[in-house]
Image (cartoon, coloured by chain):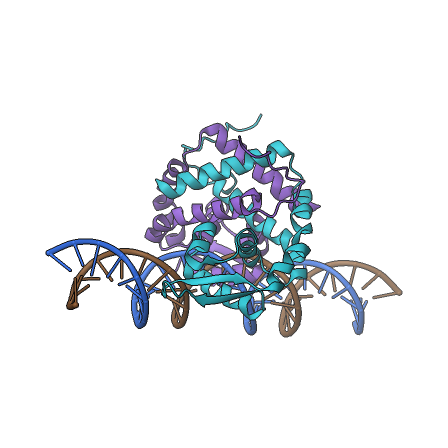
Chain colours: A cyan, B purple, C brown, D blue
Amino acid sequence: MNPAPPDPAEGSLLLDDQLCFALYAASRAVIARYRPLLDELGLTYPQYLVLLVLWEQDEISVRELGAALQLESSTLSPLLKRLEAHGLLRRERRSDDERSVAIRLTDAGAALRERARAVPLAIGDAMGLTREQDASAKQLLRLLTENVTTR
Amino acid sequence: MNPAPPDPAEGSLLLDDQLCFALYAASRAVIARYRPLLDELGLTYPQYLVLLVLWEQDEISVRELGAALQLESSTLSPLLKRLEAHGLLRRERRSDDERSVAIRLTDAGAALRERARAVPLAIGDAMGLTREQDASAKQLLRLLTENVTTR
DNA sequence: CGCGATTAGGTCGTGCGCAACTAAAGTCCG
DNA sequence: CGGACTTTAGTTGCGCACGACCTAATCGCG
């Protein structure tokens, strides 16, 4: 027979009982799966996430971008500089509030969207989850994130 | 009414449709939640994972550790050096196979286990998932990891 | 108006995480 | 036996992630 089912309230120190490890391993595995696809676009995974946001909404501040991706400016600033150096976006201080920096896609950055269309399809295929499993996972992960960040 | 439910096979480029982002954000949020707890033990999150393995099985090779945590030696080698510098473990070449390095806990490393007992309890509490949700999340994440790494 | 508090973005230091590469040790086979 | 191949750790370079800290701009309140 199997051992007793692990209780999340029980506080096991076994690696395989830890949801956190399943999460950490899955996240890295998925990102690894993205890597060859994103390599072709010359992007890293966090850079791809930034572009996802910019493809939805051009003209955004670093602060807003950080809020969308849950990343600090100390992470975003160098990342945005690299994307700017690659010619995908521009950064300029806003005239109405000089503290704020407006991020805007260049034509090259906007054009990359078309080449990126195939990426979510390929990933969705590799993930191999049913529509229900996908939705259920997303829901659980959001609940978890919400709980863990607010309490 | 709500828009049509997103289909994982449909290939949306909207950030909030991406399971990968929910995963990435959740993983970082959970690790952030661990941080203050692990700070008290003088550990980072990956170091804590390494100790979880060693508390289960003392005397393990770098290779086996990498297999358990899905990490490369290029990640583990410096990490293990830091843990050794902190006096938590020892590394020594195996006499029967000089390529291999045996990792063994010191007394201090083994003793840390008792102080770590409270960690999973606090995290489980912060995650705030029911036993069923916890199990379901773990199962989905393992399926996802499996699919994404093997195909 | 003036000045302390807040906000936005940035740099710096540290520790992952991984690809590419290296060196050394072990294995396999003619 | 000996050389090709494989395996194991390790180093290096680069790009995150984040905390601590900094500067400049703006806000708020007396």
What number of labels is visible?
Answer: 0
Work out whether residue A28 or residue B48 is closer to the camera in this orientation and state it: A28
Classify residue D25 by image quadrant.
bottom left
Q: Is residue B120 shown to the viewer in this render?
A: no
From what the image shows, is residue B22 above or below residue A114?
A: above
Q: Residue at x 50, y 44 (%)?
A: A21
The picture quadrant where one finds residue D6 is bottom right
- The residue that appears at 61% across and 53% down in the rendered structure is A32
Q: Where's residue A56, x and y in %? A: 55, 51
Expressed as whole percent of the image width and height from the top left, the position of residue B20 reads 57, 46
Q: Eyeballing the image, is B49 above or below C2?
A: above
Residue B82 placed where, x, y %?
A: 44, 62
B56 left or right of A115 in image = left
Give A138 or B124, whichever is nearer the viewer: A138
- Relative to A61, D19 lies left or right: left
The percent coordinates of residue B125 (x first, y second) are 38, 36
Along the horizontal axis of the image, is A69 left or right of A45? left
Question: Along the line of sight, which residue is nearer the eye, A144 or B116?
Answer: A144
Residue A4 seen in render? yes
Question: In the rendered image of this protein, does residue B118 appear above or below residue A32?
Answer: above
Q: Residue at x 69, y 43 (%)?
A: A125
